[in-house]
Image (cartoon, coloured by chain):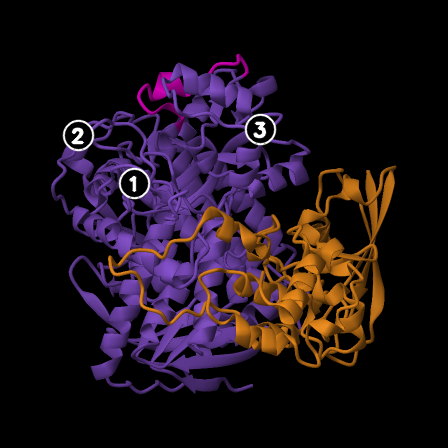
Amino acid sequence: MKASLRVKRYNPEGGGKPHWGEYTLDGVSQNDSVLDLLHRIKWEQDGSLTLRRSCAHGVCGSDAMRINGANALACKTLVARLGSGDNVKIQVEPILGLPVVKDLVVDMEPFMEHYRSVMPFFINNDNVPEDGRERHQTIEDRERFDDTTKCILCAACTTSCPSFWANGKYVGPAAIVQAHRFIFDSRDKGAEERLNIVNEQFGVWRCRTAFNCTNACPREIEVTKAIAEVKMAITNGII
Amino acid sequence: MKPIIHTHDAIVVGAGGSGLMAALYASRGADVAVVSKLYPTRSHTGAAQGGVSAALGNNEEDRWEWHAYDTVKGSDYLADQDAVDVLCKEAIDAVVELEHMGLPFDRFPNGKISQRRFGGHTNNDTGKPVMRACHAADRTGHMILQTLYQQCIKNEVNFYDEYQVVDLIRVDDTIRGIVAIEISNGQFHIFHGKAVIFATGGWGRCWEVTSNAHSLTGDGAALCLRRGIPLEDMEFFQFHPTGIFKLGILITEGVRGEGGVLINSEGERFMEKYAPSIKDLASRDVVSRAIFLETKAGRGINGQNYVHLDVTPDTVNHYFKQDGYTDRHIDKEYIEAKLPDIADFTKTYLGVDPTVDPMPIQPTAHYGMGGIPTNVDGEVLLNNDTVIKGLYAAGECACVSVHGANRLGTNSLVDLVVFGRRSGMKVADYCKDAELLPLPEGSADEIMAEFERIRNNTGSVKHHDIRKEMQATMTENVGVFRIQENMDAAVVELAALKKKYVEEMSIDDKGALFNTDILEAWELGCLLDCAEVTAVSAANRKESRGGHARDDFPERDDENWLKHTMCYLQEDGSLTIDYKPVVIGRYEPKPRVY
């Protein structure tokens, strides 16, 4: 089968303007991923097409893009999911809300700054167990924050969020997911400080429960639910 | 454009598990910069699935000495046994320490870290598989990577994200720093320091079907080779038995640890023939060869070169009963809880639900046992006896050697936490007294000229074409089974590809901004170097051992070949081979039976 791709191109070097690049590929299979197709364009037609990618199977988080209008990882989006017939039409753009560096590559720094702002690290200054071994945790306590440990920082959630698009100062879903991972970890002692951070003006209350983040997450984290749980923890305490 | 110069005590190259572990420890006593071509959390440690072994004995008796014996046996007796002792003994502390850093391990009902069975890990008294692999579902590597990165943020380690290291600055027998490109704008930077730690991972992209990320192009190993450091045991490259058919995506050995079995077209659990004692949990080289032989004998599924990995509850419980496990029984929910990512991968890429249907798998190029030679403190060796001051390596790019001719499952994660930590400590110590040696004039000139050459070269060949040819020859000739004639052919072909690389390759993107075209071209040069050393080392070793299996020399030959290969790049571009003795300890080499 054939695939027709429209890819948003932009190279500011030499004063280029954003435009659509049009590419046609033959011999495409239903099982090809969008990353496979972008690689074919880059390797067979135009080496200047620029994107990030690494693991190519949905665990490193490098290739979040806007594919046919929705955020997804290019390596986890198969042609079969985008249409059938002899000629599948695929539109690829960079994720929204972060400055574009070139083609599909955005500046991740604002996103990473939000991530770092929520103290995304384990805090427990108590002495470790006397036998020198691990702290204990029940299976139930471990399960409590399992969902948010899966985050790969791909930014698909944050850059699908209307509140983030409206104001980039909002810490965004990904940072709240990271805060959640520690707030609900029974071993961690930094919950209060973190809750204070996400309770601020550009914290959780910017969330309007649009559920875009949940739909966008390639790790199937229930992002909106995690945000709601953080909101509840601020108002009612951690349950 | 002149390079920008930065000065730090120590420069860590690569931000996967070993790099971050080294950075954490080195930063306790030195000013450290981590320079990585990827954002740290995108490193391939994050793709490791099944577990990190340590003889915690949380659910049954275990001892680090058993772990050591299993590792030595798994290595086909090529591992240095003093280093293996360090690995297995310190694994316990290292894993506990990861837990103290907040790593969310799965738990046993008693609240301790949960452990599972894994290939080649046994109770040495009974010979039965032992629960040693500490895990967080099938995302153990992800959790290690995230936890270490989080701790680095907490400790305010300096990161230079998306800076690609392209040269090592060596003056005589000292190291002065590295040269890197800032990917976003093409600016060259020199990182001047007292110590450099390479933690750049493997070179699995030398082969067609691989579990490795696109970024695993052997940069650190190639840079060391080019600056006169030998590469050790490069002929030993692991083919993991269970990659998704055609795609190579890893399906963790944890699947078999939880009871999954390999089945051929006749419905036969064929590992019973090859490893009567521990069957599907034999070491990876043994299982990969068995799959290869089954498909060669026409017992691949649908006559093709793949078999089934079956973890459906009915099949697993059937074989539990047959194997005499009266206390083991699994159901759909258990599989979904223990192997969620595997289920996600096979559903996404194959439309297969592993709790309902078997998964089509084939061996996939996975892990380099060889690499940059180091001692147990991560110090890089210039030859068999001499350490080069200020240069360190850890993780997959290094060869300590704890994996010998074949690595046991989970031991890559053990390696990176144990030796990442040790090299970090050693560097902190070294930087206290070492003086910052001056940076030579024009340290970046040579590599900047090479980039200009690649940028301006005219020719009709694309880097992708050369890469495809390299991967084809490595797959055909330096794969699971090897023979002299084919390996010699690969050596000749790789030399021709290197010539083509220099003379005929051109790129499309001539710009400075985020130029991944030129970086992929440069990375291909690293892959070609790693492939060539692998092929030359393989053609030279006239025996079968671990991951190096030859049809023409099917037996292990301890009399002549119980020694490490040390491959050197000479000034005229030729490769020469020398040998290093293997350190034998408590375990005398004996035939390996599983």
What's under tag 3, amino acid-wise?
Answer: Pro
Is the residue at mark 3 from the same chain as the one at mark 2?
yes
**Rendered residue at 45%/37% (across/down):** B254
Q: How many callouts does the rendering have?
A: 3
Q: Is residue B264 left or right of residue B354?
A: left
Magenta stretch: give its range.
Answer: B265-280
**Chain A representation colour:** orange
Label ID, residue B360: 3
Residue B484 in sight in this render = no
Q: Which quadrant, please, contains the C terminus of chain A? A: bottom right
Looking at the picture, which amino acid does disc 2 mark? Lys
Q: Residue at x 24, y 35 (%)?
A: B73
Reading the chain from its start, which is encountered first: label 3 or label 1? 3
Amino acid at circle 1: Ala
- What secondary structure prevails in the magenta region? loop
Numbered circle sitting on residue B64: none
Disc 1 sits on a residue from what chain? B
Which comes sooner in the sequence, label 1 or label 2? 1
| Chain bearing mark 3 | B
Query: Can you identify the residue that label 2 sits on?
Result: B590
Quarter holding the N terminus of chain A?
top right
The Cα atoms of the two marked residues, 1 and 2, are separated by: 14 Å
Give the drawing colour for chain B: purple
Q: Badge 2: few (under 14), some or many (20 or more) residues near its Cα, within 10 Å? A: few
Q: Nearer the viewer, mark 3 or mark 1?
A: 3
Q: Secondary structure at mark 3?
A: strand
Between disc 3 and disc 2, whose residue precedes?
3
| SS under mark 2 | loop
Name the spot of residue B251 as percent of width and height, x first: 51, 38
Give me the residue at 32% from left, 70% from top.
B25
Chain to which mark 2 belongs: B
Quadrant position of residue B124 = top left
